[in-house]
Amino acid sequence: MALRARALYNFQSENREEISIQENEELVIFSEDSLDGWLQGTNSRGETGLFPASYVEILRSRAGSGYTESPGSPAGSPGHGSAFYASPPSVSYQGSFEDDDDDDWDDWDDACTVVEEPRGPPGANGHPSAGLQPPAPPYYGHQPAGYRAKPSLERQDSLSSSKRGSVVGRNLNRFSCFVRSGVEAFILGDVPLMSKIAEAYSIEMGARGPQWRANPHPFICSVEDPTKQTKFKGIKSYISYKLTPSNINSPVYRRYKHFDWLYNRLLHKFTVISVPHLPEKQATGRFEEDFIEKRKRRLILWMDHMTSHPVLSQYEGFQHFLCCRDEKQWKLGKRRAEKDEMVGASFLLTIQIPTEHQDLQDVEDRVDAFKAFSKKMDDSVLQLTNVASELVRKHVGGFRKEFQKLGNAFQAISHSFHMDPPYSSDALNNAISHTGKTYETVGEMFAEQPKNDLFLMLDTLSLYQGLLSNFPDIIHLQKGAFAKVKESQRMSDEGRMDQEEADGIRKRCRVVGFALQAEMNHFHERRVADFKRMMQSYLKQQIIFYQRVSQQLEKTLRMYDNL
């Protein structure tokens, strides 16, 4: 049943799931049961969405009492003109990373994800989208004067240890990847420093700005020989791939499920890196030859991007995935990777940045330019994907069919010439008949050609669609960090924050900014190399194809020379 409510404070929406409300505005709410501190309803402008439960009071008419009740207050608690609010609980968003500790490597089921993290439309590196989990209760930013929700234990410890006089407002949009990724907590100094950090990733200044320091031990890894194997006496089947890293030159065999496990670890750890997407899953036809070949091609591209990335290629979990051959050692390494503490926001603690000064506005302008570029490239990649996919369809269907029709028509002419023997020329008839067969052959050549050129182009485009889809949310992390820096400086200028604390926020923002710029530079380097290779391969294969067609036609043409 819809209920009437009144807004106690102003609230500004920050994403499309929320609506803005103004103090004293009358609202209609659909249920007084809040979802983690949020209510859904309609404002006076007819907009429907979410807003904080603690910002409104439900209007009730009760005989003998003159008080209203807040959705966050215990039923029947007298307000006497003011609302009582329950302290919102601290909500954790950890996935079940430890749940499969006792699972055997070989006992994973190909039909499900081992690490049961949300896998909807990926945001920043696969961070779950808004619809996959409810928002945490609103706290910190946008709070009315005189009211402050009780912080979680982690936040309390941070506040007491830093002895801050003021705190930069937290983002109320708990759907935001800036919040979900933990980058907000990092910027505000709420990610605890580790006593010992075993890993470190350096950024250095290059000719085109910040760049990741190269892997001191570069390597490549081949993906070969997809082989169907069975276990449980043939009850279960799967495909294994032979991986051979160049640095050890000793093969290991991995299933797609193992790749999927590694991919989840990468998403969980590397917050500000565009992790290449794995080739898509398929519920049926997993053992069909065309699908296996397509997946192998795309795993090769995926592996190439992994080994070429200065940070991802050095990740201990990736090295363990590529090199471990002993079952007992594998389980130990697997558990170690799943219990890695330097993940998400803590990963940012492992990044070492240059001392060079960068103007905040210059960095923001550079990020905005990359944002516009990546959006345009994403659109053009999608356009080329659609055109190439349609061309594949025509090659396999339309072109082959049209050439077959042409070939049949030529052969029909040849057969008709046999109908009047006195005037029949066997040499001409045979030449025309052979011409028909030639065009049928050309039709089959067109049908087979996408395997040599268009499929490889589509594989590259698919990889870049995934990489580009990561950047909007990664850029959003930087935008959120910029906003916190500006807010902290304003509070410092107003005397509401120590300059030392504002400088700390700016320093941590530099880490996020340098990391994003290094990732942008790496993306451009790979883009140039990959698209050069893609275009060269496509044009070379096109030349070879039309040379073969030309040879078929020239051979047929010579049959008419001596008639």
Image (cartoon, rainbow, N blue to C red):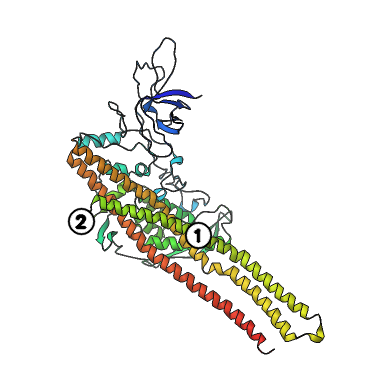
Please indicate, yes or no, whether residue 289 appears anywhere in the rendered image: no
Residue 311 location (% of width, % of height): 33, 57
* Number of residues whose C-alpha sits closer than 10 Å to that of mark 2, classed few (under 14), some (14–19) or many (20 or more): few
Residue type beneath disc 2: Glu
Task: Write down the residue under mark 2.
Answer: 356
Please indicate, yes or no, whether residue 203 appears anywhere in the rendered image: yes
Q: Residue furthest top?
A: 64
* Number of residues whose C-alpha sits closer than 10 Å to that of mark 1, classed few (under 14), some (14–19) or many (20 or more): many
Q: Residue furthest bottom?
A: 562
Q: Which mark is on residue 385?
A: 1
Give the tally of numbered discs.
Answer: 2
Residue 69 location (% of width, % of height): 40, 20
112 vs 415, left or right, is: left
Residue 220 location (% of width, % of height): 38, 66
| Residue at position x 35%, y 33% in the image | 90
Where, by quadrant of the figure, is residue 439 drawn?
bottom right
Query: Which of these two is toward me, 152 or 493?
Result: 493
Query: Which of these two is toward me, 315 or 369?
Result: 369
471 vs 382, left or right, is: left
Tell me the distance, in whole angstroms, between the alpha carbons under discs 2 and 1. Answer: 41 Å
101 vs 206, left or right, is: right
| Residue at position x 41%, y 46% in the image | 127
Q: Quadrant of the C terminus?
A: bottom right
Question: Which secondary structure, mark 2?
Answer: loop
Residue 484 location (% of width, % of height): 27, 42
- The answer to whether 64 is drawn above or below residue 367 in the figure is above
